[in-house]
Image (cartoon, rainbow, N blue to C red):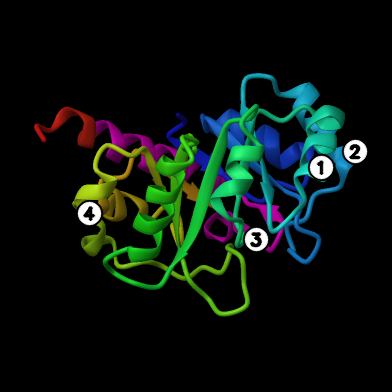
Amino acid sequence: MFQVKICGITSLADAQAAADAGADAIGLNFYADSPRFVQQETAREICQQLPQLIKVAVFVNETVTTIGQLAQQIGFDAIQLHGDEPPQTIAELSDFKVIRAFRCQEPALQTVQQYWQQCQQLATLPEAILLDAHAPGQYGGTGHSLDWHQLHPLPPSLEGVPWLLAGGLTATNVAEAIGAAQPHGVDTASGVEIQPGQKDPLQVAQFVQAARAALSLNDSEPS
């Protein structure tokens, strides 16, 4: 499991900036309606040029067939499902590492708990879950934040589940968010951008530095 992911990468230069900053992973968004949509040729070049990064392909309600075809053509390392995909989709993608993202509306995470239980019944669990803020009609990258303090501890049915925090994270608030929510890792897109789809290398570097310091502090504290 990675700790720091810079999502919505649309160019090799931005991917290189994430790598130079010390990020573990980047997100390549294949949702056509997103301002961070990445062209297939660019995604392939990034995957070839930056083997040290974990490349996560982000999909929204895409078919399993298309996902499989793109995996063969581009060569990403993991899949993030950020739409309304049912647990059966994860079962159909059993050959891949899958991160299931949730746009959370309820503080008690009832939907997430029910989904995880259904995955358990199918004996097909995602590699991790990602908790993002909900915005009507949008699938991530909104800049909205969750209530970090309500996320720790997670409900008992999710105890021990690897999870990532997203939603409105920036270099200035990520340490506070990590301290409050205590996730295993963090994910940002709009929080390190000059404009949608274009990253600011300085903000990326500051975000990674702040996130790593806070995650290291969490790891060193007794649970």
* SS for dot 3: strand
Q: Find out whether the residues at labels 4 and 3 contact each other: C-beta distance under 8 Å.
A: no
Residue found at the very far front of the displayed protein: 121
Q: In x, y percent, where is residue 75?
A: 77, 27
Q: Quadrant of the C terminus?
A: top left
The span from disc 4 to disc 3 (Cα, nearest Å) is: 36 Å
Residue found at the very far left of the displayed protein: 222
Q: In x, y percent, where is residue 127?
A: 48, 34
Task: For residue 120, say whether it is visible.
Answer: yes
Mark 2, residues whose alpha carbon is within 10 Å: few (<14), some, or many (≥20)? few
Q: Is residue 97 left or right of residue 74?
A: left
Q: In x, y percent, where is residue 102?
A: 48, 59
The span from disc 4 to disc 2 (Cα, nearest Å) is: 42 Å
Front residue of 128/46: it is 128
Label placed on residue 8 = none
Q: Main secondary structure of the magenta part?
A: helix
Mark 1, residues whose alpha carbon is within 10 Å: few (<14), some, or many (≥20)? few
Q: Name the amino acid, label 2.
A: Glu
Q: Label 2 belongs to which residue?
A: 41
Q: Name the amino acid, label 4.
A: Pro
Q: Label 1 belongs to which residue?
A: 65
The span from disc 3 to disc 2 (Cα, nearest Å) is: 23 Å
Q: Label 4 belongs to which residue?
A: 155
Mark 4 or mark 3, which is nearer to you? 4
Q: Which residues are magenta?
A: 189-216
Of callouts 4 and 3, which one flags the residue occurring earlier in the amino acid sequence? 4
Mark 3 or mark 2, which is nearer to you? 2
Tell whether position 147 is magenta: no
Of callouts 1 and 3, which one flags the residue occurring earlier in the amino acid sequence? 1
Of callouts 3 and 2, which one flags the residue occurring earlier in the amino acid sequence? 2
Mark 1 or mark 3, which is nearer to you? 1
Q: Name the amino acid, label 3.
A: Ile
